[in-house]
Image (cartoon, grey):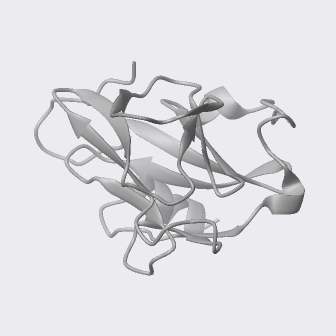
Amino acid sequence: MIEVPMESGEITASAYLVVASAGSWCDIHSLVPGSPVVIGRGGENQVVLHSNRCSRRHCEIFSENGEWFIRDLKSRNGTRLNGRPLKRVEPLNPGDRIEIAGTVFLLTSSICEIEGESLDSSIHDPDTATAVDIIHHPNDKASESNENK
């Protein structure tokens, strides 16, 4: 379980969504309590997948009562969590893998946890990987530091 920090004051990420593409980790999105992340094909989403297999609003990651959850938003081709079809709202845990339209996302509570982590070829097919745009928010300090490198 990845717990959401309950401190007041500065907004900090309590988890990270790491995007895999072409067999390697390629982008990071900070998950901030109170800021749901919608993944889909539509440009208004926080994470945009450029694939016709992805619905406009495919799935949502959100925090509730100090924990992170994922739900499919009635997508046409479904969302997979750890290789299984997502049928209802599910809690997220460190190391969980989310697959949408051939793109794999890893959930982690620390960026350091993914160093040296390899992608499982049975979950990720680089031939079907799609382009991903991460929409960074002004309060997303981890994203700002990555962009400045």
Taking 61 as reference, is 29 left or right?
right
Q: Position of residue 38 (x, y in %)?
A: 38, 59
> Which image quarter is the N terminus in?
top left
Q: Nearer the viewer, residue 36 or 80?
A: 80
Q: Position of residue 55 (x, y in %)?
A: 49, 67
> Which image quarter is the C terminus in?
bottom right
Total marks placed:
0
Q: Residue at x 53, y 36 (%)?
A: 107
Query: Residue 111's quadrant in the figure?
Result: top right
Taking 134 as reference, is 89 left or right?
left
Q: Residue at x 29, y 44 (%)?
A: 62
Q: Nearer the viewer, residue 123 or 149?
A: 123
In the image, residue 16 above or below residue 7: below
Q: Nearer the viewer, residue 147 or 94?
A: 94
Q: Farthest residue toward the left?
A: 8
Q: Position of residue 84 (x, y in %)?
A: 60, 30
Q: Farthest residue toward the top?
A: 1
Q: Residue at x 45, y 71 (%)?
A: 135
Query: Residue 114's quadrant in the figure?
Result: top right
Q: Farthest residue toward the bottom?
A: 43
Taking 37 as reference, is 34 left or right?
left
Q: Position of residue 117 (x, y in %)?
A: 77, 30
